[in-house]
Amino acid sequence: MAAVNPLQVMLQPVLRQLNPWIVPVSEVIIALALLYCLLLMARVARYPKNEEDAAESRQKAQRNLLNGIISSVLLVIIILLIRWGLSALSVWIGI
């Protein structure tokens, strides 16, 4: 009698449900992150460079843009690592 891997028995149904969804969901999340960065860029462009009254607001908008870009890049890296991890796990489990 062949030994059955309990991890394989537990993970096969989960991975069969996740694999079709991971690519479309990750693409939507990446598109939303890009849209968020574009909206932050529009906020920076709204404040004129020459006016001293808007200098503080412009600097705050620039900081928000920098934070948005950093968080979006990190989000994309995390999503790519999750996609890679699920594909490696699927190959290891044998799906």
Image (cartoon, grey):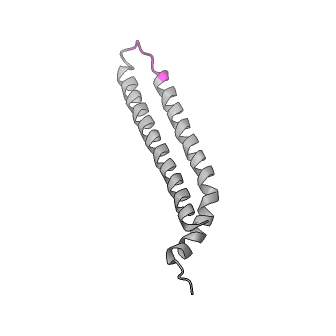
Report the number of discs.
Answer: 0
**Residue 68 coordinates in the image, percent (x, y):** 44, 37
Q: Which residue is depicted at the point 54% across and 73% down?
A: 8
46 within the magenta span? yes
The quarter of the displayed image where residue 11 is located: bottom right
Answer above or below: position of 45 versus 30: above
Tell which of 11 and 91 is nearer to you.
91
Q: Quadrant of the N terminus?
A: bottom right
The furthest residue to the bottom: 1
Q: Which residue is depicted at the point 42% across and 15% down?
A: 49
Q: Main secondary structure of the magenta part?
A: loop
Answer above or below: position of 40 versus 87: above
The furthest residue to the front: 1
Answer above or below: position of 72 versus 38: below
**Residue 5 coordinates in the image, percent (x, y):** 52, 77
Q: Which residue is depicted at the point 58% across and 65% down?
A: 15
Q: Which residues are magenta?
A: 45-51
Q: Which residue is depicted at the point 51% across and 78% down?
A: 6
Answer above or below: position of 7 versus 76: below
Tell which of 43 and 29 is nearer to you.
29
**Residue 27 coordinates in the image, percent (x, y):** 59, 46
**Residue 55 coordinates in the image, percent (x, y):** 36, 20
Tell which of 47 and 85 is nearer to you.
85
26 within the magenta span? no
Q: Is residue 50 left or right of residue 18?
A: left
Q: Quadrant of the C terminus?
A: bottom right
